[in-house]
Image (spheres, helix red, strand yellow):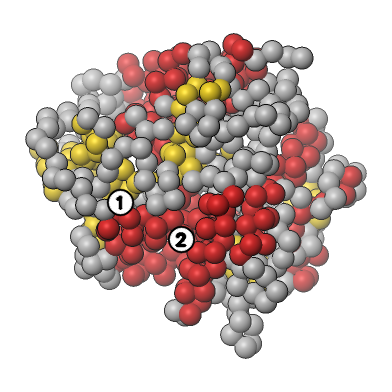
Amino acid sequence: MVTPYIVQDSDVVVIGSGLAGLTTALHLAPRAVTLLTKTPDLPGGSSNHAQGGIAAAVGPNDWPEAHAADTIAAGAGFVDAEAALLLAREGAERVQALLDAGLPFDRAADGAPLLGREAAHGAARIVHAGGDATGPTLVAALAERVRSTPSIRVETNAFAVDLAVRNGRVCGVLACHPKGWVFHRTPRVVLATGGIGGAFARTTNPPEATGDGLALAARAGATLADVEFVQFHPTALAVDADPAPLLTEALRGAGALLLDGHGRRFMPDEHPQAELAPRDVVARAIGARVAAGEPVTLDLRPALAAKPDGFPTVLALCAAHGLDPWAEPMPVAPAAHYHMGGVVTDRSGRTDLEGLWACGEVACTGVHGANRLASNSLLEALVFGARVARDVAERTLPALPPFALPQPLAVAGGVGAALIDAITAEARSTLYQGAGLVRDGAGLRASRQRLDRLAVALDVLRGDGPTDVASVRRWGEARNRLLAGRLVVHAALNRCESRGAHFRTDFPNEDAAALRHAFTLKDLAGSAGTLINQIGQIGTGDAACSIP
């Protein structure tokens, strides 16, 4: 049980302890920051599991303009070109600054960074650390800096339940801590909570990636965009594990080959870039074969021979599941990996709610479009985490007016916990089957109905019960997963075309006239209604979609 309700005043609250959250907090120093993370220690989030590197034009004969062009090409027509160029230019500066600061990136004998190449990149521009351990190596170094920064107060095992909003302005965060319910009264909140992979039954994301930030912002009334675009990583290890172990894209960049059930290389028939085609192309090529009952394997041996010391994480993952990649190709299948959509922000990370910023995977900046370019995710966290910090520090906000404090929740424990887990499992399976790698209108509508029913069932489990942080987190993550899934389905129904990571068999072609969709939670109540698009379009609902 917990101690009574606490009110804690904070100048800035950052929610999330991945690369985006750590970067934001560090760049705000010496300003006082409260960093909330639901994990038991720093760091957390998907960044800590990222095997791939950071894309940046820091090598000879490479330029940010070329990096931006590759980003735009991969995004299937929906990338904001100016944002992509900003990402590439400032990203090169950020990565170079980290190199100059001596962070432990992989380097040649002369000290220059060793640069790899990944899918859809026109040059070798991927900076790695620890071979295939870039994420954990980088965030561990930044987490140590956060711990030693006096102006940053880290609150671990703290689950953010809801944002408090009054008259369109964020006034604080209601969170459950081991010490009890805490209302963090603050005029400035930064969401850096990562993605929504945990809403799907099969994902490469860690357990904490449950769509918390997307759900917090949606319930608060913020505008969302590109929510239908969920990237499935082509080569997750096909073993019974949650999350699914990831076999990094860098393996294919180093020469690993995809083989069908007959041991034949098939990607050259699918795309001119073969194994280095955009992720959506590779994922669907693999997914189609797996769905037909044909095993697909990734032969790592060419990559391991080329870089014997380059993939320690991959070798450890394979060994943990009793597999030897030196002896035979590894079984693979696609898994939910990255969310291109999120909370709409400007280039300083501001949302359309005063006092709310977002950065990293939870944000929708326009740099990813319909299909993220490999290794741009850590880069985005670095660039926009710093931009958010600068805007938060420079922007003056008036003092908060008096307002009624939000009421904490009571949730079910005991038998209720088992029911919550069952609802979660069914919701994840429903989303993976109905709004996964390949979609159609009938499957999406069936998923919508099922997820709506599950949301009602979960709400019944509110009421008298324990308010310990474990119970609140179980119920809150289930609520967030369900909302994230319903938002994805809603957006997918309203995109009556196939583009990038969104593929509908009933609308298999790209619509040249289509634009990006933006909407708010209010639109979820009438899924066949009109989407208010604040990126230049009025989109029509699924009822208006017709099969030609």
- Quarter in which the N terminus is drawn: top left
User: What amino acid is labelled 2 in the image?
Assistant: Leu
Q: Regarding mark 2 in the picture, which secondary structure is present there?
A: helix
Query: In percent of the image, x 37 and y 41: which residue is there?
Result: 351
Q: Say which of 35 and 367 sits in front.
A: 367
Residue assigned mark 1: 14
- Quarter in which the C terminus is drawn: top right
Q: Is residue 440 visible?
A: yes
In the rendered image, which quarter is residue 456 located in?
top left
Q: Say which of 525 and 148 sits in front.
A: 525
Q: Which mark is residue 515?
A: none
| Distance from the alpha carbon under mark 2 to that under mark 1 | 15 Å
Residue assigned mark 2: 382
Image coordinates for residue 329, horizontal then vertical, percent: 79, 54
**Alpha-carbon neighbours of circle 2 within 10 Å: few (<14), some, or many (≥20)?**
many
Image coordinates for residue 172, horizontal then vertical, percent: 21, 40
Query: In percent of the image, x 39 and y 58: which residue is there?
Result: 387
Compared to residue 305, the image places residue 222 above or below, namely above
Compared to residue 497, the image places residue 389 above or below, namely below
Image coordinates for residue 404, horizontal then vertical, percent: 12, 30
Query: In percent of the image, x 64 and y 68: which residue is there?
Result: 63
Q: Say which of 352 and 479 sits in front.
A: 352
Q: Say which of 498 and 137 sits in front.
A: 498
Image coordinates for residue 470, horizontal then vertical, percent: 30, 38
In the rendered image, which quarter is residue 409 located in?
top left
Say left or right for 86 vs 404: right
Q: Is residue 53 visible?
A: no
User: What amino acid is labelled 1 in the image?
Assistant: Val
The answer to whether the residue labelled 2 contacts the one labelled 1, judged by CB atoms less than 8 Å apart, is no
